[in-house]
Structures are given as structure tokens and as C-alpha cells.
Amino acid sequence: MKIVMEEAPALKDAIEAIVNLVEEGVFEIGEEGVKLKAMDPSQISMISFSMPKKIFREYSAGEQKRIGLDISKFSKMLARGVSGESVEMGVEEGRLILTFKGGKKKRTFRLPLLDLGEGLEREPKIEYKNSVVINADALREVLKDAKLVSTHITLIADEKKFRVEIKGDDGEISEEFEKDGVALKELKVGAPAKATYPLSYMEDMIKAAKSETDITIYLENDRPLKMEYAVAGAEAKYYLAPRIESA
Amino acid sequence: MKIVMEEAPALKDAIEAIVNLVEEGVFEIGEEGVKLKAMDPSQISMISFSMPKKIFREYSAGEQKRIGLDISKFSKMLARGVSGESVEMGVEEGRLILTFKGGKKKRTFRLPLLDLGEGLEREPKIEYKNSVVINADALREVLKDAKLVSTHITLIADEKKFRVEIKGDDGEISEEFEKDGVALKELKVGAPAKATYPLSYMEDMIKAAKSETDITIYLENDRPLKMEYAVAGAEAKYYLAPRIESA
Amino acid sequence: MKIVMEEAPALKDAIEAIVNLVEEGVFEIGEEGVKLKAMDPSQISMISFSMPKKIFREYSAGEQKRIGLDISKFSKMLARGVSGESVEMGVEEGRLILTFKGGKKKRTFRLPLLDLGEGLEREPKIEYKNSVVINADALREVLKDAKLVSTHITLIADEKKFRVEIKGDDGEISEEFEKDGVALKELKVGAPAKATYPLSYMEDMIKAAKSETDITIYLENDRPLKMEYAVAGAEAKYYLAPRIESA
């Protein structure tokens, strides 16, 4: 395996989409690119992450198809790359070899591979009839509002508006977005939907999204939410289980 | 009651003058504006705060004349307002309704009212013969110096100078200000005065003052200090009990 | 003794070179300038610090030749000086008197002198055959890399390269610098050398170095490292004991 990213910080930005949810994970190094599917330890959320071959300067998959890593340590090593440096990834003697190059300086980081067993995660098969495209920062602000009064947030999509409701002991909040091309970019509603999700997971899921990123949220009544966005050429896709109110 | 502030952050800035000293308080919604008088829980300091009707875009007092609030939660909700948004306050079903509006987005926060009983705070009636007008940042720097060696600060005003003295186990500090139009703007002394006050309260009292604000301090020998300044159109007035050295 | 520094923050910057390693110390006030030699409490590192007379606006040594101080408190007082203020140091009644002046404001800080006994620290006498001149920020980045996997760092100088190696349970790192005039300014090797040092001390030793400072490191096999740099006209010289691997 030899995979080279022209700008080291871009790889760090992409991996950021995983590190907030899972501590360990298996990267699958395929002919078409790198993939990772993982559930967070509490099994409330799932990530399906992929980096297509084309975002790399050099890409050859090699023999070892599965690379188990401590994602947190991997991310911290990547974070040491600076603009102007390339980063090359290889595997040697049971270790991931990360080589940063730039100018007359060369840095090599070695990270032990983990034996994590087969990944059996399957993505939920849900036909979503509703989707919302919202600006990443606008969504982040909604979550900050929500945290003032609760740990959960209710998302509601109907034909005209995207709404959120948050209820807690310290107060209540309701917010309405009409399609404005700035915060709410798109609103497609097949059948109005409403569901409640844990705030902290939503925060972690959008942490890697850059300010002006479009976030697509798919929503069905009391079903898992699906969220998608692009970061540094990679695609991050998340599923998040709803909280079902006991009747 | 319907009260609208054109720029939401201005209301947050004004309320900042209260939140550092008191956790709960009763706003009186009068014909001429909003007032609040409260003592801090330790009864060492008192605030008398007022926002005149004219700083609001819309102002109608309504039936409910007294609004008891958790000031800290109120302030955190106000802090969610951004430049370009207006904020409207109303009362409904025992709750304060805060509505932020700007563009095609509308956010409504509801905060339960508190039943806090009659406010009986009375402002001390002291005829001050001495006053000092000092720049807010200059005063902040004095307090930072003072914290290095003590928890109290002695203020001294005489005909020529405004002085502070701080004594502690870790050292001593003395500072002198002559009227210079920059740090010390004004010095009126009827009878030289000297008194010692707790630093942490003074810090809290000036926290809401913007950098270039003029702070007026009224001083008498071993009597409560009075401090006044304006913030976002509101007037903040504080009293602070002196520490009397036992003879 | 009367010593005046034109710009108070410069004195703070210089003292910064000491405060990170030693808590108390004795300044020797000589005819040619101010010196301090001290070991850190764990006796793993040593500093030899000097400020030549010429960096001061006024300098007269006076009778008291040795000034024992709590360096941390001294540094915090100096940190209160601002650009545009001068600072004067004198001694009075067993206390160091620091006077900041600027405009119509005068601030005097008094710090008790400590009776710290005779300083007997002697600098190691080592003839170094190897030296490396490296940019301060580049060295700081090396130490940040190293912290990811270990508490120690191995420095290696040979004819062509300056290298570092770091090994720990969480991975391994190796870095190579060729002379490039940017990160590695100079490399003089008489006999290739290699030794291992504790990271946290190296961090503390370079903390006072400004971004573009040249740091000179002298290196011998398993001998103490010597490090030198200039800050605000003062010269900071450090020694650091190596970790010797048991055979």
C-alpha cells in the first residue's frame, strides 16, 4: 500500500469526520478508495465514511486490505502535518507508516495496527421521503441554542418550513426556518416528519463540517436520521437513532 | 407587555451589568422603562439598574408589572442573539417569551417566571463629597495589579491625586493617578477620603463596562462606595460595603 | 542599587527565561550586569542567565550584591508592565521596589527579598565538539511531535543531518533535518553524537525564545546538553542531564 495526499492537513480534515464518534476503526483499502464503517461505542450512531482514490496524488492499494487503527492517535499524528507538506501512508511490520515531507525536512510517524476483527456494520435501509439542506454553521447555532434547555432536539419538516423544538426544565425553544438560500438551502417533503434526537451526537456528527458546507439531513417519523456532507474530498454519512417517547 | 429591542446583542450587553452580581431578580416594568434593584446573595453589594423606555424600538408595559427571572438563564438566552436580529419580550402563561427575528428565521425562547416576592432593597442615602471619573480599562488594570498581592483594595482621593494601596503577604502595591484626561478624567474632592473594598466585587461590578466607558466612583471615609456607568443605553449603579478595620 | 529598563515588557521577556525552570533564585548585581545561576528543584537542569549592563537605560549596582527573589512572583509583577512604561528596580528595607512609570501614572510594587544562602552552582565543564543551530519554532514543533508518543527525545547529530528519534508505547517518530537556512541554520559535527533528554525540560527551556530566535544546542554522547539563546538583550544558557539507559 502506498497512498499519498498532496496536502497533509486535508487528510486530517477528512479524518476529523470519524474521530468525534469512534475511537477505533478498520479502514478498508479498496481499488476505488478508502472506506470505513463504524458504530460509536454506545451503538446510537453509525458512520459510513469514504475517500475516493481521486483525492490522492498517488494511490495503490497493495495487499493489506484492512487497516485497524486507534483513530484518535491516528488523528493526532495527522494533526502534526502542516500546509505545504505532503503525507504518505504505508504499512510495514504491523505498523502504519506516516511520512510527512516538505522542504529539507522529513518526519516519519509509526503507529501500531490494531487487530479489530471483521466489521459487520450494515447501513440501515430506509427510504427517506424528506430531506433538508442546511448550512453547517446555521445548524451548529441551532444546536447551541438547544443545549441551553435540553439534551435532545426535535426536528420537524413540513411543506413550508423546517422547524426545531426543544423542551427542558429550564425553558423551551422553538425555531423556524423558511427556505432562504442562506441558512436553509433546500426543503423536500414527501410526508411531513417529526423525530427527536440526542444533541451531543448531532454536535459530534457536524464537528468536521467546514463553515459554508451544505449539510443534508434525511428525516422520517421516529426513524433514524441520516446526515451527509463532504469534507476535503471525502464523503461523511451518518445515521443517528431517534429517541422514542414511551406511550 | 411588549418590548422590542432593535439589536438583540445590545440587550445582552445591558443585562451583563446585573448577571455578574445577582442570580435572580425582579424586573419592574414601568411606564418609563424597566428597573431592577437587587442585593447580591452575600448582601455586600447592591445594584440599581434601569433601562429607559427610549432605548427600545417598541415599548408597552402591559399588566404584569413585576417579572421575576433567573438572571443567569435569561442572560444565556439573550447571548444567543446575533447582530442583525431584533428581540421581542412578552409574557404568556407564566413564562417570559423571547423572540429573535432576522431574515426568514424566527427563534422563540420561553423562560419560566420566578415568584420572588417583594423587592425591598433601598439604596443607601449618602451625600458623597468626592467623586472620581476613571476609564473602565484603566480601572480594570488597577484591579488586576491588586489581585497579585491581596483580596482587598484601598481607594484614596485627595485634592491632587487618586491613589490606591494594596497590602498582602506577597507584597505591596501603590498607584497614583493625576488627572490626565485619559485614565483619570475627573477628580472632585470635598474632603479627602479613604476606604477599603473587596476586589472580587469591584471586578464583577465593572465587568459589563465597555473599554472606553467612563466609570464614576463616589467615595467617603469608610462608607459604601457608589459606582455608576452607562452600558448599551442602560444605567448601572452599584453600592459596595467597605471593609472596616477593627481598632 | 538603581537599575532602569526603558521598556518594562522587555525585562519581563528576559526573566521569562528563568521562571519556567526555577521558583526561587539569587540575582547577583555586579558592575558589569545582572547574573543568575540556578538549578531546577529536581537538579536535572541548570540555568546560567545574564543581563549585561548595556541593555539598561540606567545601571548602578549599589551595596547589596545579592538579591534573593521568588522568581514566580517577580515575573508576575513584571508582567503588569505595559509598552510605553519604564521600570526601575531598587532595594529598600528588605524589599525589591519595582516602579513603573509612564504618563501621569506611577505604580510601585514591593516584593519581599528572600534569604536564600550562597549559590554554589557551577556550570559543567564539557568540551563540546558538536553544535546545531535551529530555529526556535522549528524546535518547538519537534517537541510537540515527540509528546504524542513519549516523555523523552533522542537527539542525534552526524556530518550530514540533525535527527531526532522518539519511541513510546503509542508509536514511534523519527525526524531528519538537513541544513536549509530556515529550520536548521548550522550543523557542526566533530564526532557524531547521540543522547536522550526529558521532553518537558526542553519545552520549559525554550519557552522564553521568540519565534525567529536561533537556538544553539551543544551535544555529546550521553552527556548533558547545553542550549543557548538570546532574549531581549539577555543571554540564557541551559544545561540538561541526559537519560542514561541501564545496560
Image (cartoon, coloured by chain):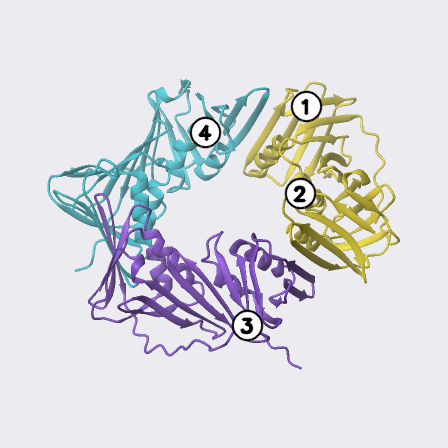
Chain colours: A cyan, B purple, C yellow
Cα separation, mark 2 vs mark 4, equals 28 Å
Residue A9 bears which disc, if any? 4
Cα separation, mark 1 vs mark 2, equals 22 Å
Residue C185 bears which disc, if any? 1
Residue named by callout 2: C204
Cα separation, mark 4 vs mark 1, equals 26 Å
Q: As rendered, which of C138 and C79 lies closer to the eye? A: C79
Tag 4's secondary structure? Answer: helix
Tag 4: amino acid = Pro
Q: As rendered, which of A168 and A17 lies closer to the eye? A: A168
Position of A230 relative to A20 (above/below): above
Q: Are marks 2 and 4 in contact (CB under 8 Å)?
A: no
Tag 1's secondary structure? Answer: strand
Cα separation, mark 2 vs mark 3, equals 53 Å
Cα separation, mark 1 vs mark 3, equals 67 Å
Residue named by callout 3: B129
Does residue A22 appear left or right of residue B142 in this picture?
left
The residue sitting at 85% across, 43% down in the picture is C122
The verdict on a common chain for dots 1 and 2 is yes
Residue A143 percent location from the top left of the image: 31, 48
Query: Which chain is home to disc 2?
Result: C
Does residue C151 appear left or right of residue A17 in this picture?
right
Does residue A16 appear left or right of residue C242 in this picture?
left
